[in-house]
Structures are given as C-alpha cells and as structure tokens.
C-alpha cells in the first residue's frame, strides 16, 4: 500500500505545482487596458460556454449515474460521479488558466520570445500537471478507499466494476467536452475566416469581425478544456484498465496482486515528478528554436523517467527477476476448460480460442522492458507527427507546393498526406504490441500503455501551450500591438500546430494499445459472468465480421456528424456576422464596436445542440448491437458481435483519427509555410489555396479526428458495463 | 454437366450479342470530318496507352506465371494466364467500342436525346455483356476441361488451385489496369482543368487546350477499360470462390458436388440472358428522365432474373426442398476434432474456434433465397448510391449549398457526405451477411455474392455508358457543334456520374460478401494443408489484431499512393501545357493546333510509371506479413496474422472505397447542379468552389477509391496461393 501512498503524494504534488505555477503566472503583467478588455471578453465567453456545456452534460450525467446505481451498484455510481466531476474539473481549470495566460503571453512577448514562450508553456504545464495529477488522485484514492477502508480484496468484483465506472464517468464527460468544444472552436474559426478573410477582406483576428472573440473563446474551450478532458479520460482509462486486467488475469496471492495493481499508480506518480522537472528544461537555445526548447523539456522528462520507472518497479515488486503469477484469461477464472469443437453451442464453458493469448508468467524486469517500449512509442509518435506536420519536412512542403496549382491540388495533396500519415504510427503500434506481448502477454501491453500515459503531464503541457499562443496572437492583433509582437506569437503558434497534432496521435496511439487490453477485460468478464456460454470470437464467425464492420462504421458516422455540425454552425456564424455588418455599417468603418457576445452566444447554442446526438452514438450503439444480434442469432453471437465491434471501432478509428489529425496539422502548417514567404507568400494565389486547405483541415483535426479517441474508449467501457449489468450487478 | 454446357452457351450468346450490337453501332454515322478527326486522335491515344500498359503488365505477368508454374503447377499457371489474358481482352474490347461510340453518340445527339442515349448505352451494353460473357466462359470452359477432359473430381485439390490461379490472373491485371487507367484519366482531367479552366480561362474541352485529347483518352482507358478489367476480375473471383468454397466446405457425393458447383455458372448464364433482354427496356419515357430509362433496363433484368434463377436452380439441383450435404470447415476436412484449450500450441489439429461458423446443411430453396438477397443488395446499393450522388437529393444539394460560402466549406461538406455515405451500404451488407448465413451458412453468403455479380452485364452496361457520353460532350465541344448538342450530352453525362458511382459501390459491396467466403476458403485450406498446426483466429490473439491493423493500413497507403500519383502527374501535365502555350502562342489565338500527342505521351509515361509500386503493395504485403510474423512468433501466428490481414483489408477497404467513390460522385454532381443554374450557376463564386470540390473528388472516385476493390481481392488470393505454395503445390 506504500506505493499507493507515494502515488497519492505525487498526485498532490502535481496539484501544488499547478497552484504555485498559476500564482507565478498571474503575477505577470496583463498588459494595457485594451488588452485586458479583450482578454476579459474572451474569459466571459469561455466561462459562459463551459457553464452551459457542463450544465447540459450534467443532465445526461445524472441520468446515467442513476442508471449505473440501479443496474450496478452505489459504489459504481460513486466511481462514475468521481470520474465525471474530475474530468470536468480538469477541463475547467485548464480553460481558466489558459484565458489568463493568453494576455500575459502577449504582454511577455513584447519583451522577448523567451518571455512569451515561458508564459505560454507555464500555462500549458499547469493544465498538464492537473490532468495527470487529478487523474492519478481519482484512481489512487478511490482504490485506496475500496481496499484499505472498505476492506475489499484487490481483485474483488466490486473493485473492477467501480474502476470501470470511474473510467466511464471520465469518458462520458470527455466525449461531450471534446466534441462540443471541437464544434465550438471550429465553427467560430471557419465562420470567422469565411466572413472576415474571404468576404469582407479583413485580416484574421481583426477586431471589426464580430466572430473574432468567439474564435478566441473556441481555442480555450476546444483546444484547451476539451483536450484536457480527453486526456484526463485517456489517463484514467489506461491506468484503470491496466489495474482491472491485473485483477482479472493474473493468478497470484492477494498481496502480490495488490503490489502489481499499485505499480501503474506509482509509475504515474514518479512520472509526474519527472514531468515537473522536465518543465524547467524548456528554454530557448542559441538557435532560438522553439520546437527545440519544447523538446528539451520532453526529452528531460522521458530520459529521467527511465531510472524513475526502474526504481519504482524495483521498490514495488522487489526482486525484478522473480516470476510473477500466471496470467491467462481462463486460468484467472479458475476453470478447468476442455472444450470440444463439436460441442460448440452446447454447455462447454469458456470463451473459444482465447487461451493462446495468455502468457503464463512474467518477471518485474519484463514489465520494466514493456514500460520502456511505451516510452519509445511516445517518442516515436512525437517524431513521426513532427515529420508529417512540421514545416521543415517533405509532407508539409508538398502541400505548399501543390497550392501553386490551385485549391483543388492543395486539397488532393493534403488528403494524400493524411492517408499516408497513418502508416508509420500503425507500424510503431504493431511492433510495440508484438514486443510487449512477447515479453509479458496482455499485461505487458497494458504496462506499455501505462508508461505512455505516465508522460501525459508533459505531453498535455506541450499541447495546452498551443491555444494560449494562438489567443496571444489574437489579442496582440486586436489590441494593435506592434507587428513584431505578432511575429513572435505567430512563431510560437506554428509550433503549437505540431504539438497539438502530437497529443492527438499520442492519445489515439495509446488507445491502440489499450484496445487489446480492454478486449481482454471484456472476454474475461464474459467468461466470469456467463461461465456456461460459449462465445466464438474467431474471425470465421460471421457475427464477428458483422461486429467488426459495425464497429468500423462508428468513426465514419461520427466523423460525418462532426464535420456536418461544423459546416452548419459555421454557416450560422456567417449569416450572423453578415447581419451585424448590415445592421451596423459603423462596424466596418471602425467607428462602432461589434456585438461580440451575440456571436459567442450563437456558437454556444449551436455547439451544444450539435454535440448531443453524435456523443450518444458510441454509448447506445454497443447496446443496440448486442440486443439486435442476440435477438437474431442468440446471446453467444450477440456477445461475439459486441466484442468484435470493440475491435472494429479501434481498427477503423485509429486510421480515421490519425489521418484527420495529421492531415489537418499539415494543411495548417502548409499555410504558415507559405505565409513565411514561400511560393509567393501572403496574398498570393498559392496562399489562397492554402487557406482553403487550412479551412478543410480545421474540423478534421480539431473536431472529428480528436473526438474519435474518447469515442473508442466509451464504446469499450459501455460494453464492459453492459456485461456487468446483464449479469445483475454486484455489491 | 448439362448446366455447365448451358452456362457456356450463355457465355457465347453474350459474345454474339456484343458482336451484333457492335455492328449496329458502327453502322451509325460518325459525324462530320472534324468530329472524325477528333475521334481518331482519341482512338490513337487510347490504343497507344493500352498497348504500353499491357506490355508493361505482360512483363510482370510472365514473371508471375513462371512463379506460379514452379511453386504450384502447370495447370495453375495456365489458369493464371487465361484469367490475365481475358481480363486484358475485356478491357481492350471495351475501350475499342467506347472510342467508336463516343463520336456516334455526339452525332446521334444532334438528332435526339433518345438517339444519343441509345448509342451510348448500346456501347456500354457491349462492354457489359463481354465482361460477363468472357468471365463466365473463362471459368466454365476451364472447369469443364478439368472435370470432363482431364477427369479430375470436382473437389480435387488441383481444381481449387487452378480456379484460384485463374482468379489471380484476372485480379493482377485488373489492379494494374484500374490503377494505371485511373491515374491516366485523372492526371489528364485534373491537369487539363487546372491549366485550362483555371489558368488560361478557357472552357472545358476547348480544342486550344493541349491536354484536352488526353482528358478524353483518359475516359476510355480509365473509366472504360480499367473498369471493365476490374469488373471482369470481380466476376471471376466471386463465381470462382463460390465454386471453391463448395468444393472445400460441402460434404456430399461427387455428383452432388458437381451439380452445386455448376449452379453459380448456370446462374451467371441465365442472368446474362435476362441482362440482354433488359438492355432493350432502356428507353426514355414521357418525362424524358434519363436515369428512369436506365432504371427500366436494370429493373427488367433484376425482376426477370428472379424466375430465371428459380428455374435454373430447380433444373440444376432437382427437388428444392431436399437437404444438401453438410457444410462445415472442419467436417469437410474429415477430421474428428477435439481440442482442449490447455493443449493449444501442441498437436491438436484443426483451426481453433471455427466450427460454429458452419451450417450443417441447406436446401436448394435456401440457396434460392440467398440469391434473392444478393439481388436485393444490388438494388439497394444502386438506390443508396443514387441518393448520395444524385442531384435530386439532400447530399448533393448540401454540397452545392456549402459552395456558396467558399471552397473550404464545399470540401468540408463533401468530406462529411463521403464519410456518411458508408453507413447505409454497410448496414445493407451486414443484414445480407446475417440473413444469408442464417439460411445456408458460408455457402449461402457465397451464393448471395454470386447472384449480385450475375447482374454484372447490366451494371457494367450502365457504367460503361458514362465515359462514352463524357467523350461525346468533349467531341461536340471541340467540333463546335451547336450548344443544344452539348446540353444533351451534358444531361446524359450527369447521369453517368451516378451510374459510375453505382458500379463502384456494387463491386466493393460484393467484395464485402466475398471476403467472408474467401476467409472461409483460407481457413479450410490451412486446415487441409497444415493439419497439425493449430491456428488461433480469435480476436484475443494479439497477432490477429496485428493482422487486422496491417490489413486495415493497406487501403490507406494504397489511397495515398494513388492520390499522390495523380497530383504529381497532373502537375507534369500543367507544366507541359504551359510550355506548349509559351513555345507556340498561336495555340491560344486559335491559329495553330496544339501538339495533343505529346501530352498524351507524357500522361502515358507518367501513369505507367506511377502504377507499378502501388499495384505490387497488395501482392507483396501478405507474403511479407506471413514471413515476418512467422519469424517472430512462429508459423501458427504467422498464419493467424495473415488471415486477419485479409479481413482487415476489407473492414477498412470497404469504408475507404465507399467514402471515396460516393463522395467523389457527389462533388461532381454538386458542380453540375450549380451549372444547372442553382446558387448562381456557371461562373459564380459558388461554381468556382464546386469546381474545386470536383477536382478533389476526381482522384477520390476514379483512381484511389475503385482500385481498392481489386486490391482487396488480390490480397486474399495471394494468401490462398501462398498457402498452396508453402504446402509444396499439387499436381
């Protein structure tokens, strides 16, 4: 249990770091009155939106909490509420610091590039550490309470269910927050661009554009709050499912199980410490490379994490060469299984053909190697994402070059890059799965995913830095600060495009690893809840194919909803702004101030309306598939189709998400590359084509693509809870 | 065997129909001298391209034939050559009639819309009947020879291998033809548009554009020859794999097997007859609805096919209520299998967990119902495709409306529609799989796919009509025919966009059904060739997930290659045309004729160069995956990963192909909808945005999307042949 206490202490440390760093940030000058005016308009808009978003989600949340309490248990409902509330809190605090850091970054950038970088990155680091810290605290404290206070065995059914419900709470909030925030930010962004840049011919972030505040609000509620909720969810689900898998799969004494289940927590804890240390390495070198400065922070965290993880593993497990328990889906259930193929459909217990997926035992050293694999995957995904979205490499340059021949070729090349960008991350994930599985079976894959997420504090810091610099640029423009300030914030922002894409690739990559673990949990649960049912998960079972196809469909349908929602809401913004221009001609002349609040309000209503149906899609689809297939082909095939659906959604979602987020980032930076003076620079025909590509990439990378990650998780978790509910709930 | 003779007779009938109808077509007037001049330039270009393409493919083909002969058998090599040569012949003849019908359609459209429609549709019908007829003849005659002349048992190993090799030959050629033709047609189209419409400001098909002939050549070599080769391949693979599955899975007497294996052949035969009858129903009604006229032909064929299939089934199988054989992967192998989960990895024979995928028996009536399901799937896919790509419905209108706010929103809405368009076809396929499987197991699914393809003659006719009208429009423009002629050909062409999308949806839909059957063949083969190897195809096996992910990657990577190739080749066209304009200013003044041949030659070289690597991707990937995973995790997991790859490629390819082909069709028709006078009509800002969408959709719908279908097939067939080769070949 000491490891759990250490983890809790590290979680508290992250919160303290957040409080201290926030204090330092708030002490920075918030600039002149005009800047503060603008910043407070953004603050108000962001708070108003998040307030309404969370109110709406709360209604759904309360209903679901009651359903969980009734079908499962009160403990599970408590877990659900903890997950949901903390996911919301992570987003809210992230937004809150971000809307204060933006103006301070603009002001600091008047001084030096380093000043702007520090202000923006500190703000990101607060969000990052709170995401990791609150996530760790949520699981660790809940686990501590259930084991130490309530006295349950570490592998008790109720602990598995309660941790699953905790993950569900986090996922449910995060899908709404990711999608709602994503629709808000891109509807405002696309709408503002269309009516401002294209129709009225005024530059980006021109204060005469009534949608300009909404655009800046969007950065905070989408790229910051939505992203934070998403990564909080990813953190909680990954650590949670690792612990659940240990409880379900590993055959060992209670004491050994407790140690193993505490391991993901302490790993999360020590990596928070290394991440905090890493934040102090973010400094510009002589070359003034911003990406280089951010990388220094990441590499410091990653490299320090290697000995930290080793020591933590050694401390928790003791002798690293000692063989630990037996892991295996069937062994864990304690059954002696002998199933004849001729008896399928009869009473032979067990899940067909899963035992070869088990590894009987592993050592602490094996787990350490698996965690190094997770760190390597993180580093490789960052590198690959930078290659595909950075302005220095072939992909972005090829899109910029294609812009010379027009809008069409820009989009064609962007789509080609977005398709291509899926290849390397997939190969990295495949190699990681094979290597971790060879070392320690499913548990090995789970620990690889855990160590990936252990660096979440640092990765989120790199991401949350982006919207702050984006806002800072907007404020500099609107407040009429000198051009050089805008140049500095633009330079900071260009790197933000890459770091934003990185986090998305990282989240979806970890989902690729976690998917196998979640599926393992599903099959083991199935075996435990329905021991008399033989479920055939073989690819030869057509219901498995049906499940794979239906699962694969979800990201497409979800993407279609997201893209359509942005298009529709952006159209509404265009009409609203046109009306303001028409009713109040003084706006364009600069003599009259536009009604920013009305536009913010419009986007708020549109985003909240549009987020409901698509968010419910992954919640309700698994339930529908199970009941329909069960009605048609019996319960065993219902479970087979449902299980296959869980993998179908990752097999297709991985590609949809990777292609959308990388492609979108590449389009955005191709535009920036041209604005840097290549292929004719700003105002050229190539630039116009690149703006089109950027617009197309916007909902790709910031609405539809990133929401695929929580969608995958929620589909999986709903399936696990459905199993428990069908079995009647426990405790 | 009588049924086989009937099938052969019907195949010959199709060829005769083709000859007679070609004769009728050629008797039509080919217009004035100017028109004939243009048409002969197109003819020369198309012939030159196809000649070079087939020469290049022949080099690959000869190498592969030798490999097949050495690793398998001479008989298989003969099968490969037959498939390859006839696939080429189908494409070549289709192109040949199409380049003659184009000018005759333009001339006939001077008279009446009905005249133009008849000429274009007859040309399509020739291609359609030859595709179906040659496909049927290839399989039926080869099967007849092996059984009647060479005296093999219908389920002899050598027959299975030879039919697989036949399918391989057809697939290998068709992937080159589809991709090469697709790159040619879209490089020329996009290049011509960019440099003509956008840069020089001259209309589409303006004779001053040096790329205009290449554009028209492209319609013939891509949309006609490439498509014909693709559908030939789909036909041969679907019927072939149905026969192979019967041989492998059904436990029955030789006589009964022969009857069952002849059934797909006679079904193909009678549906050729109903398709030929259907072609005579294509007539404009009072409403002058072109789509309505084409639908009349399709519905006549489909409805006549119902009794025809019933009679053919009754004739071949006798009493339709008699229970036929036992079908089951394991039973077919004749083993008594009792596998304990604890023994996995040891010597228990068989493929883990496949037996629940077997249905023990079925009646002739069950098969009849399955074939009706296939017809229903065809009709539904046509209807869904029309909904998503027709100018009358929400999707196309929504793209047109989004064009009002610019290039970006046009592309966003088009992408949203392309994602959404995957949903209904997937649901149709899922329902069909479940229903056919409930009726008659895997064999039922195979027969549903067979009856889908039985209508190929009619469906290809609807498709091949498109490029003819497109060409006719181009010739009318270049020859300076009156505007009303161009209006008529444009009206014919708009429908062509939908029918072209229909065929692609149909081909990929049938691939969805065939995938399960191919996987069934794979597992059965595996069990037969490697009886001592236990392969775990359960989703719990990480190597299965690895295979699914790698398979899912293939369509993305392939799509990226295709899109990039078009972008690169189109860029080369732009530069070539710019140079012609620069060197010869008389071209733009209309005093000097551009060098059309040079542009055709450039596109030819580019397309052939670009097609090689992507086409080899699906051939080499399965082999690489098998050997790498075998090296890492043993042969059983190598086979598991390979098998999963086959399903991964369809699970992801289905969505990639459907979204690309439907989205591309919708973009194209949104442009046409605006050109019809909506949202400002031709020349408006909305029109410019719609042109961008159309350009983006071009390589989506005509290069990358349709080539996914042969890619899926070839991956599957290579896997089957790899199994046979590893087992040492037979005969």
Image: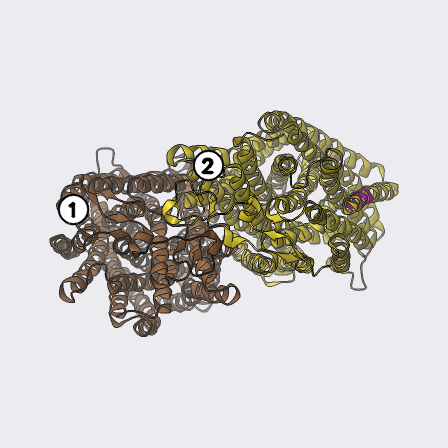
Chain colours: A brown, B yellow
Q: Quadrant of the N terminus of chain A?
A: bottom left
Q: Would you identify the image quadrant in which residue B573 lies?
A: top right
Q: Where does the image place residue B149, in percent across and percent down from the top left?
A: 76, 34
- Number of marks in the rendered image: 2
- Residue A219 visible: yes
> Which range is magenta?
B7-14
Q: Quadrant of the C terminus of chain A?
A: bottom left
Disc 2 packing (10 Å; few <14; some 14–19; many ≥20)? some
Q: Which mark is residue B253?
A: none
Q: Where does the image place residue B140, in percent across and percent down from the top left?
A: 74, 41
Q: Which residue is located at x 52 percent, y 40 percent? A: B526
- Residue B585 visible: no
Q: Which of the two labelled residues, at mark 1 and mark 2, occupies the earlier sequence position?
A: 1
**Contact, mark 1 vs mark 2 (Cβ under 8 Å):** no
Pick whichever, B238 or A555, lies toward us: B238
Label 1 is found on which chain of the structure?
Answer: A
Q: Where does the image place residue B406, in percent across and percent down from the top left?
A: 52, 54
Q: Would you identify the image quadrant in which residue A67 lies?
A: bottom left
Q: Report whether A117 appears left or right of B232.
A: left
Write down the residue under mark 2. A398
Q: Is residue B142 above or below residue B420?
A: above
Q: Where does the image place residue A331, in percent across and percent down from the top left?
A: 30, 52
Write down the residue under mark 1. A317
Helix, strand or loop for disc 1: helix
Disc 1 packing (10 Å; few <14; some 14–19; many ≥20)? many
């Amino acid at each position: 249990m000491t490891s759990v206490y250490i983890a809790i202490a590290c979680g508290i440390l992250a919160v303290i770091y957040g409080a201290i760093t926030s204090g330092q940030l708030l002490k920075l000058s918030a600039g002149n009155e005009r800047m503060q005016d603008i910043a407070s308009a953004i603050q108000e808009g962001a708070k108003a939106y998040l307030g309404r978003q969370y109110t709406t989600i709360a209604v759904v949340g309360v209903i679901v909490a009651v359903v969980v309490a009734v079908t499962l248990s009160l403990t599970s409902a408590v877990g659900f509420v903890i997950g949901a509330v903390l996911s919301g809190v992570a987003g809210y605090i992230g937004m809150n610091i971000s809307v204060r850091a933006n103006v301070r970054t603009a002001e600091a950038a008047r001084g030096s590039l380093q000043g702007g970088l520090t202000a923006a990155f500190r703000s990101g680091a607060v969000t990052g550490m709170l995401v990791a810290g609150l996530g760790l605290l949520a699981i660790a404290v809940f686990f501590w309470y259930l084991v130490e206070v309530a006295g349950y065995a570490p592998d008790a059914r109720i602990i598995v269910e309660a941790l699953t419900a905790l993950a569900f709470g986090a996922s449910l909030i995060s899908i709404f927050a990711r999608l709602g925030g994503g629709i808000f930010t891109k509807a405002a962004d696309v709408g503002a661009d269309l009516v401002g840049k294209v129709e009225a011919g005024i530059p980006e972030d021109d204060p005469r554009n009534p949608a300009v505040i909404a655009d800046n609000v969007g950065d905070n509620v989408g790229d910051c709050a939505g992203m934070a909720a998403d990564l909080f969810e990813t953190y909680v689900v990954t650590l949670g499912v690792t612990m659940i898998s240990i409880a379900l799969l590993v055959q060992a004494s209670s004491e050994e199980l407790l140690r193993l289940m505490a391991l993901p927590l302490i790993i999360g804890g020590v990596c928070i410490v290394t991440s905090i240390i890493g934040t102090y390495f973010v400094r510009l070198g002589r070359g003034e490379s911003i990406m280089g400065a951010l990388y220094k922070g990441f590499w410091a965290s990653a490299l320090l994490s290697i000995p930290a993880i080793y020591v933590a593993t050694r401390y928790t497990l003791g002798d690293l060469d000692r063989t630990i328990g037996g892991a295996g889906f069937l062994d864990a259930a304690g059954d002696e299984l002998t199933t004849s193929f001729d008896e399928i459909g009869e009473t032979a217990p067990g899940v067909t053909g899963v035992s070869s997926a088990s590894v009987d035992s592993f050592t602490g050293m094996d787990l350490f190697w698996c965690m190094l694999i997770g760190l390597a995957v993180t580093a490789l995904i960052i590198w690959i994402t930078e290659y595909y979205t950075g302005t220095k490499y072939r992909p972005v340059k090829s899109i910029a070059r294609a812009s010379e021949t027009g809008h069409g070729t820009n989009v064609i090349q962007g789509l080609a890059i977005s398709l291509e960008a899926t290849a390397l991350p997939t190969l990295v994930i495949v190699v990681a799965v094979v290597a971790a599985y060879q070392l320690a079976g499913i548990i090995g894959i789970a620990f690889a995913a855990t160590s990936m997420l252990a660096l979440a504090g640092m990765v989120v810091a790199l991401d949350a830095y982006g919207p702050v610099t984006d806002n800072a640029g907007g404020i500099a423009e609107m407040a009429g600060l000198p051009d050089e300030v805008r140049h500095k914030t633009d330079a900071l922002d260009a790197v933000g495009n890459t770091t934003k894409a990185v986090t998305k690739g990282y989240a979806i990559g970890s989902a690729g690893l976690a998917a196998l673990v979640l599926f393992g949990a599903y099959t083991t649960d199935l075996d435990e809840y329905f021991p008399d049912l033989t479920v055939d998960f073989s690819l030869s079972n057509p219901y498995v194919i049906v499940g794979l196809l239906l699962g694969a469909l979800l990201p497409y349908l979800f993407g279609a909803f997201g893209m359509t929602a942005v298009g529709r809401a952006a159209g509404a913004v265009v009409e609203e702004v046109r009306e303001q221009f028409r009713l109040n001609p003084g706006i364009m002349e600069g003599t009259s101030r536009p009604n920013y609040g009305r536009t913010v309000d419009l986007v708020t209503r549109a985003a909240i309306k549009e987020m409901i149906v698509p968010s419910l899609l992954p919640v309700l689809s698994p339930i529908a598939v199970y009941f329909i297939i069960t009605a048609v082909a019996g319960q065993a095939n219902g479970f087979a189709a449902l299980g296959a659906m869980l993998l179908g959604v990752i097999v297709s979602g991985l590609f949809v998400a990777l292609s959308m987020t990388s492609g979108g980032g590449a389009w955005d930076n191709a535009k920036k590359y041209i604005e840097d003076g290549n292929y004719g620079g700003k105002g050229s025909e190539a630039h116009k084509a690149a703006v089109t590509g950027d617009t197309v990439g916007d909902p790709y990378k910031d609405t539809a693509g990133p929401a695929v990650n929580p969608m995958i998780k929620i589909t999986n978790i709903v399936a696990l809870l459905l199993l428990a509910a069908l079995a009647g709930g426990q405790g």
